[in-house]
């Protein structure tokens, strides 16, 4: 159950109580509430004043001349029965008014000329809390905003707006209103791009990331007595930076966003674009994993730096991106504050390979548009990260009839013509493939040799 509905109910109950009796009132009070004694249905009034003091007015129900005795509650007295101490007595009056009263408990005993005695008890709260300032702690990792109240927030929560449960023998302290004083808090930043955490706390911490834009910050406190306290910081300069970047790869001559689920082959062309915030300098670094019998280490293979106002992209030399595992580091630096942030992404360049399943064993170069070439199937998947490639085709007698050296992905295949331009005869031929990957893996003879059948029939 929230606090506000309770307050409204208490105000209504108190108003009815005051209207029925009307003999102990609080001129100038802004809120009237009721206690919440635990062992009785009879509750006393709580009068709230905005300021440092309050006032009370008492009279006998009969309106006769009376003797009025005023008592104030002293919680320091060990015997609860004796805690109401007499501080003033007046005689022969029809009403008594006490002003400049400090916060605390009060009791008034009124005896009129007919010896009729009435006793009224109340608690008086003086809400003079001020929101003095907002202390600011700004670091590279977080921004902390700490509002300072007078009196201190701790004192308000545990020592102010206190009453004692007079229905209990030991009259324990109740600080319900003090603990609820800071229960309705909101924060706002003047810069809409700053995301503030959902917080109902007096102390606000903005982190992950710390603010990246200059802004003022405003706190608004709605207290249980209907007062609104508000304070705004001066403009807080953002000192943190956040590293962010876009990785793209060259696919068929155009840049496409890098996908961690896609296997890329050497040599891999990268485009690195910084999208870092609140920085003036950016740095790049690429390292690869090197494994030796003794240890596994990260070896630096490329680096770059620039002022972001001049250049926010970098193009590593694709020659460094041979098959292997890489870490791409990006650093954003705010030179004025000294704040640095970094981001790292792991990239795998596929190992070199030639798939034997992609090599056919029959073709028919008869010009019908079907199977006219002896060539690899699905080059993108079957041929990966190959640096050097040679294929030689021999007749059954051992005569070289065809040869190609170059990029296997650019090889159109053998069309059935010899190196002299004549059509090769139908029959069985023998091929040998030799290749070397960008990871220096050699594919020589081994499984990359075999027979193929050439048919010319329609």
Image: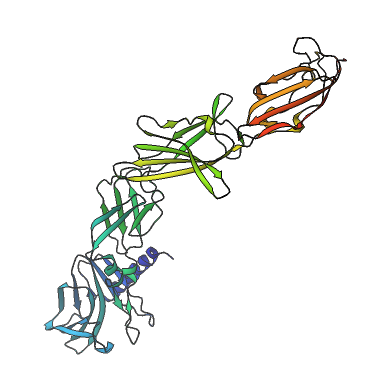
The answer to whether 229 is drawn above or below residue 116 in the figure is above
* Front in this rendered view, residue 280 or 214: 280
Residue 85's x, y, as percent? Answer: 19, 85
Residue displayed at 29% across by 64% down: 225
Compared across the picture, whether 176 is left or right of 125 comes to right
Compared across the picture, whether 208 is left or right of 116 comes to right
Please, which colouring scheme is shown?
rainbow
How many marks overall?
0
The answer to whether 227 is drawn above or below residue 407 in the figure is below
Residue 52's x, y, as percent? Answer: 18, 67
The N terminus: image quadrant: bottom left
Tell me the quarter of the picture where residue 119 sits: bottom left
Residue displayed at 76% across by 9% down: 421
Tell me the quarter of the picture where residue 433 sits: top right
Residue 288's x, y, as percent? Answer: 52, 41
* Front in this rendered view, residue 4 or 62: 4
């Amino acid at each position: 159950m929230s606090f506000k509905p309770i307050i409204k109910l208490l105000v209504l109950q108190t108003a009815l109580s005051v209207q029925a009796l009307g003999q102990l009132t609080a001129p100038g009070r802004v809120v009237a509430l009721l206690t919440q004694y635990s062992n009785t249905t009879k509750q006393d009034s709580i009068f709230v004043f905005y300021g440092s003091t309050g006032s009370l007015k008492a009279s006998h129900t009969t309106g006769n001349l009376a003797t009025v005795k005023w008592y104030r509650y002293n919680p320091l007295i060990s015997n609860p029965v004796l805690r109401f101490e007499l501080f003033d007595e007046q005689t022969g009056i029809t009403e008594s008014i006490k002003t400049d009263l400090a916060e605390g408990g009060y009791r008034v005993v009124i005896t009129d000329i007919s010896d009729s005695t009435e006793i009224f008890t109340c608690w008086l709260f003086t809400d003079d809390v001020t929101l003095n300032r907002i202390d600011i702690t700004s670091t590279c990792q977080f921004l902390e905003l700490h509002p300072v109240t007078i009196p201190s927030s701790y004192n308000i929560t545990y020592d102010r707006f206190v009453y004692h449960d007079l229905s209990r023998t030991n009259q324990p302290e109740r600080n319900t209103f003090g603990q609820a004083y800071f229960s309705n808090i909101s924060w706002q930043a003047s810069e809409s791009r700053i995301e503030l955490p959902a917080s109902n706390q007096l102390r606000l911490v903005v982190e992950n990331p710390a603010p990246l834009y200059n802004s003022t910050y405003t706190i608004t406190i709605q207290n249980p007595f209907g007062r609104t306290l508000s304070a705004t910081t001066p403009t807080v300069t953002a000192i943190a930076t956040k590293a962010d970047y876009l990785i793209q790869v060259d696919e068929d001559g155009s840049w496409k966003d890098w996908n961690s689920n896609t296997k890329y082959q050497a040599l891999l062309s990268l485009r690195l674009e910084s999208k870092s915030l609140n920085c003036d300098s950016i740095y790049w670094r690429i390292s690869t994993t090197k494994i030796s019998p003794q240890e596994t280490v990260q070896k630096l293979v490329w680096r770059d730096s620039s002022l972001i106002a001049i250049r926010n992209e970098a193009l590593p030399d694709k020659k460094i991106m041979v098959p292997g595992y890489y870490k791409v580091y990006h650093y954003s630096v705010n030179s004025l504050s000294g704040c640095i942030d970094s981001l790292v992404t792991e990239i795998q360049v596929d190992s070199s390979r030639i798939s034997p399943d992609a090599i056919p064993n029959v073709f028919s170069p008869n010009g019908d548009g079907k199977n006219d070439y002896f060539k690899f199937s699905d080059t993108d998947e079957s041929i990966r990260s190959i640096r050097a490639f040679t294929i030689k085709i021999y007749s059954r007698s051992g005569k070289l009839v065809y040869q190609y050296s170059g990029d296997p992905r650019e090889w159109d295949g053998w069309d059935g013509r010899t190196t002299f331009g004549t059509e090769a005869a139908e029959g069985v031929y023998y091929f040998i493939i030799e290749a070397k990957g960008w990871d220096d893996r050699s594919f020589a003879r081994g499984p990359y040799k075999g027979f193929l059948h050439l048919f010319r029939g329609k």
